[in-house]
Structures are given as C-alpha cells and as structure tokens.
Amino acid sequence: MAAAPTAGASPHDIAVVGWAQTPMVRRTDKSETQLLLDVITDALTPLGLTRADVDFTCLGSCDYITGQAFSFVSNLDAIGAWPPKRDSHVEMDGAWALYEAWLRLHEGDIEIAVVTGSGRSSTGDPSLIYPMEMDPYFLAPLGADPLTFAALQARAVIAAGIADERSMAEVAVRSRGTGDVDALLAEDFLRPPLRRHDVPPITDGAAAMVLATGDRARQLVERPAYVTGFDHRTECHNPSYRALDDSPSTRIAAEAAGLGDAPVEVAELQAAFTHEELLLRRVLGLGDGVSVNPSGGALRANPIMATGLCRIGYAADHIFGGGNRALAHATSGPCLQQNLVCILEGRS
Amino acid sequence: MTRFVESTITFPYKRSLGPVVGAFMTALTERRILGIRCDDRVIVPPLEWDPATGRELPHEFVEVGPAATVESWTWVPAPTEQHPLDRPFAFAFVRLDGASTPLLHAVDAGTPDAMAEGMRVAPRWRGTRVGRIDDIACFVPGETPTTEGEDTGASEEPVTRMDYLASITYRNPVPAAADRAAAASRDRRLLGLRCPVCNEVYAGGKGYCPIDSVELGPECEVDLPHTGTITNFAVVTPVQYPGQTETEPFARVFVLLDGTDVIIPYATVFELPADQVRVGLRVDAVWASPAEEVDDAGGMGGSWGSLLGWIPNGEPDVEDPDLVNRIF
C-alpha cells in the first residue's frame, strides 16, 4: 500500500481556516441542499471568500438517510458548480471528506478546499434504516439495530472495568450540561445496560469547513489550525469478530497521526454513546488534564454525516482561540468499526 | 407551514452467497450450524477470509452447537417489524459449542430477568427453512433444539442465493418553491424562477440558482410558455423489476420552451409511438383535468404537478443541429 502523505512530507502546510454549522434541530423544514446552501455561505463569508475562490469541494452525505439515490447530485447545487469545479463525494461523515480534501491539497496545485457533512436523520427511522447497512447475510435479516450493538459494546466495556453505569451517567451530565446522576440512574433501561441518557439525540444538520494551504491560510486568518497529523483505520465489519472492549483502529490511527508527540489540551471525540467516550479516552490514553468534548459532543447534537466533521470544527475553534494542540476523532460503523484521528496545532 | 410527504422505497435484493456463506445457509436448512476453521479457531458465522489478516481460508467446515452459551445480551422491550420476534426478546452474542466467536441472534426468554451471561440456549428451528440466518427462529433457554410446527425438510439443492427485502419509509419536506410550482400547475401555469444574479430561469420548483447559490423566492416567479421543441430523448425498454408498471418501450424527452433557455427534462410524450420520437419535434403541454389526482410531491427531476407531459402540435420540425446538445 502506498503511504499516505504525512505532515512534514509536503512542502505545503494545510490548515483549517474556518467552519460553520447549521442550527442542530430534531427536525428541519429544509432540504439537505438548502442546509448546504446556508452553511457553505456561512463558512466562506467571514473569511471574505466566495464560492468562486474554492478550488476543490468534497461533500459527505448518505443516500440511505436522505432516501434518494444520488442525493449528492442535488447537493452539488449548493457549491456553485458552474463553471465546472473539481469536486468529489464520500458516502461517509464529512470528516472523511476532509481527509480527501487534505490529500488533494497535498498535490500543491490548489489553495482552497471546502468540505461538508450533511444529513437529515429525521427523514427516516434510524432504528429501521441502519440495520440495512449491516452485514447483509448474518445481521441485516435480524434487524440488528444500532442500540443493540451499542448496548452489547457497553456491556463489554463495563465488564472490562473501563466504565460503569455511574461513570456513563456522569459523561451524559457533563456533555449535556444538565441532569443529576442519581436521578438518571433511577430511570429504566432503554436497552440494558443503556438508559435514555446514554444514547444520542436524533439531529438534523450540516457543517461546512474551509481548508487553505501555506501563505493563503495565514492571509485568511490570524491563527490557522494546522493539520499536523491525520489518519483513519478500519476493523472487520461484523462485531462478532472483534474485541468490543478495545478499539485497535483508533489506537493505530492516533499513533500514525502523532498523538504521542506532544500533549493535547482538548479532545473532541465522536462518541454517540456514553460508554464510547470512556473507551476512547482509555484507548487514546487521555489523562484528566485533557478537556474532552467541551462542545457537548454527539450526546448533545448528533447530525449523522456531520457529527465527525463538527468534532474537527470544535477542535479548530480551540486553536483559533489561542490553543496549541487539539485532537479530533470521528467514527463510522457499528461499535466504533472505523476511526479517524486528526491533530490540529496552532503556531505562534 | 412546511408540507411533508411520505414515501416508501423497497429494494428486493437477491444476494449471491458464495462458497462459504452458501455452505452455512445450506446447512441451516438441514438444521445444522457450520463454522470454518481459521488456524486453531472456529469462526462462526463463517467467512471466506481470516477477519484479522484477510487471508483466504480453506473451506474446512466444522459443525458447531447445536447448544450455545450466552456471552452478552441486551433486552429489546419493543421489537420493530424487522426483528425476528414480535414480543420482547433479548439480542445476544451466543457462542455455539465448539465455536471461537459469538453469533448475534435473538433469545426468546420471556423477561430480562431470565437472561444471564453464561446461560445455556439452543436453537428453535423454523419448520420451513430456506437458507437464511432466520431459519433459526431464535434461541431458547435449555440444551435441546426444537422445531416450530411441521418440518418440511432440508433444501434439495445447495443454497446459492438469498432474498432480502429492504424497505424504508421516508418523510421529506416539500420545499416551498416546489409547492408553489405544483399549485400553479393546477391553474395550468408553468412557473419559472428567474435568478436575479445570472438571469437564468429554472422550472420545476427549483428554489435556488445552482450557479449563484442563492434562494429564489416568489418575487422571482415568471410564467413560461406551453410550447416547445424536443431537443433530445431516450427510448426506454422496460426491464420487469418489481414496481415497474411499464411493459412496452416508451420515450422520455427533453423539451426546450419557446423563447427561453428552459429545458423540461425526462418528460412524457403522448400520442406518439416511441419509434417516431425525434429531435426537433414541436410539442404542446398536456395538463391534467382538474378532477385528476396528480403526484405533487416532486422528485429529482422537479415538481411538475398537473403538467403531465407533451404532445405533438403539428407544426413543422425545427432543423437545428445544435438542438441535440440542449439537455440542461
């Protein structure tokens, strides 16, 4: 396998220079294209850029969620694709769209890229849609749904001593900034060992992010958030074959992204379920000194296909605000199947 | 108030199973459960490759079970239509005797209090088995397999394919511009929206300009002519997939409206055999009668409401070699 470019190998610094997100709501009246029209404008305008300045776009979305084949074709209407643009699409969270844009910018011939993640989860019933994306022979015919997989992983994480019901409730209270741990633990199980507070909300929303290279990044903003490490790894698709109390793909991605090279102040983790945050903290070796999910994370807003990109956005906000080093994590698939780690750094 | 429309999409998949999953499914019809040897382990359900390394595995099958041990479980208090049981049940990782990996399946235990790690379960087989994972209706507490109703026996042929019907119901908002276009069509008006920036006009309720990325509101509305010229077309020979209602070849045409740059795409043409459709043909709009039910939900091609399609108007063809290029 050809090695992906590593930061430092390229003569071009690549940085996040801005991002925007739509209001995160339970159900929006807007189509996905309308969400993107708004959010791309909101990301570009503060930088003094227009769509004409954008050299490359990559959109992350999912036809299964939208309920329309080739829904990304309609979404192209939001990028101002005339005259024709360099464009790509990933059927993944916008965090992976960002990865593709980062690779593309390494070629060095263009300066500005826009990536998006967008989804309207309210369009369908997630408990009925996601089983269809599982293993088609052994899992989909059983209607194996995301809550079931999360509950089974939570049990494994608890059995390994990495979490317990109380520490999970504490994650929920801290993330949402509301609730009382004892009161939450008195609630009935939704899917044992998970209670309502352990699971994410259903959210409609989109995010857009602007990347720029080298001098252009420094011209656009005072303190670009440089991408100094970026990697993603995947595990076997069927949780039957995995150790659910571990996340080796996260560990390998973090090592490859250089997490261990210097401390991070902030970690934004795409943990849709409370136990996932506790497992990821353990796997990434994040100590008490690291502020985890100051944004409230996916437990506060979970716009599928944008949740991961928002993590990178919040990590970039930390750098824009004067921070030195932040980690962003995104995930995809049942029980943290595929994991992406992005390291952002500021420079004095 | 935004209007939402509900639509259901079904995908009747027929999946090839291959030599390993096929052997597993065939064995299910015989009320046997197979794993595959992977070094010193037995992987259940079996894969064609080692999940850790991707190495292809020799087809060395090992019969496992029939009883199993619950390794982990959760309780489903309100099953969905996709779940194997219509009453509360457990989803569990059950490790079949002799297996190295757990299989996800349902356990019919009555109440969550009856579930525990380490409990012993056995399959309850369906009487009629077709070679699907749900030939095992579920697992039940105990050591002894059971069969529901009359046993109709094993498959006579190896199972090579599996049916899987995916069906999803969606609830989507109808954009305001699409609603206005559909409403105007009931008055036999063909509404366009003119972009104030580039002056391009869009029909079909497209409420934004894809060039300038600006929203187009009611102030941008213009009335479009009801006469045009076919610029291009395709004749579709229907394949009889489920849901296809057409049986004979039919045409889909692109119509350039007179005096405009507006193309109506993928339109129906009436009273013209498919083999006589041609570029340059002059056509008039065909409207639904007021009493006729029309699909006003719109779709990717646009929201056309009562504009049903186009019909030859008898005018001489337009001779223009560039016409064929106009599909946008």
Image: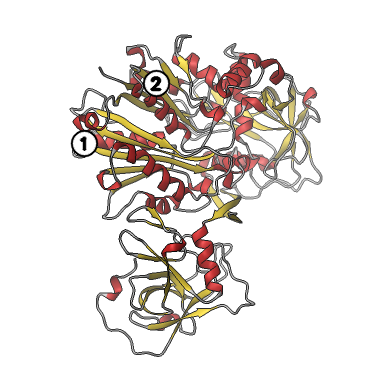
Q: CA distance from mark 1 to mark 2?
A: 24 Å
SS for callout 1: loop
Q: Is residue B38 above or below residue A20?
A: above
Q: Is residue A56 above or below residue A6?
A: below
SS for callout 2: strand
Is residue A156 or residue A81 the one in the foreground?
A81
Q: Position of residue B62 (x, y in %)?
A: 59, 29
Are the residues tagged 1 and 2 within 8 Å (C-beta)?
A: no
Residue that label 1 marks: A107
Q: Is residue A226 above or below residue B83?
A: above
Q: Which mark is residue B138?
A: none
Residue that label 2 marks: A327
Q: Position of residue B256 (x, y in %)?
A: 36, 74
Dot 1 amino acid type: Glu
Is residue A310 or residue A64 the one in the foreground?
A310
Q: Position of residue B95 (x, y in %)?
A: 65, 24
Q: Is residue B200 above or below residue B102?
A: below
Quadrant where the image shows the N terminus of chain B? bottom right
